[in-house]
Image: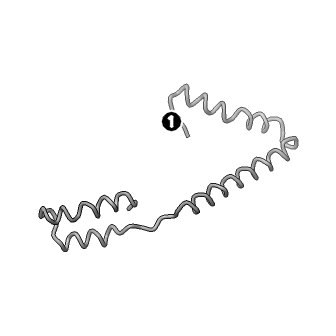
């Protein structure tokens, strides 16, 4: 359960108990079942983003270094593939991605 949903549930449970919607035992079981899961913080997000950038940059560097060694049809396909895919999806109305 996400942190925002967990916070909402813990805010609602006391009112539900007062109104008789759930029993005290039921509220306790809900708290146990939907306990907040620890989530990564800012550091984990930054490390993941830096890692993705390094991998992407490395892939681009390898392709750029070997670009002249690729056959012409591979270079044309790589250069026209993404724009062609985008144009084709726009024509048929397919979702992006």
User: Whole-percent x and y of residue 96?
Assistant: 54, 37
In this view, which residue lies farthest toward the left? 20
Q: Name the residue under label 1.
A: 95
Give the camera-side residue of 47 and 55: 47
38 left or right of 80 in image: left
Give the camera-side residue of 10 and 96: 10
79 left or right of 39 in image: right
SS for tag 1? loop
User: Whole-percent x and y of residue 31?
Assistant: 29, 70
Picture layout, residue 15 above or below residue 31 = above
Q: Residue at x 85, y 47 (%)?
A: 65
Quarter of the figure with the C terminus: top right
36 left or right of 42 in image: left
User: Whole-percent x and y of residue 27?
Assistant: 22, 69
In this view, which residue lies farthest toward the top? 91
Disc 1 packing (10 Å; few <14; some 14–19; many ≥20): few
Q: Residue at x 52, y 62 (%)?
A: 41
């Amino acid at each position: 359960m996400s942190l925002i949903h967990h916070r909402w549930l813990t805010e609602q449970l006391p009112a539900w108990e007062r109104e008789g919607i759930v029993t005290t035992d039921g509220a306790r079981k809900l708290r146990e079942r939907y306990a907040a899961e620890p989530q990564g913080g800012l550091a984990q997000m930054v490390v993941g983003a830096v890692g993705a950038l390094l991998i992407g940059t490395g892939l681009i560097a390898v392709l750029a270094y070997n670009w002249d060694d690729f056959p012409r049809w591979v270079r044309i396909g790589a250069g026209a593939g993404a724009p062609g895919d985008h144009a084709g999806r726009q024509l048929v109305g397919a979702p992006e991605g």
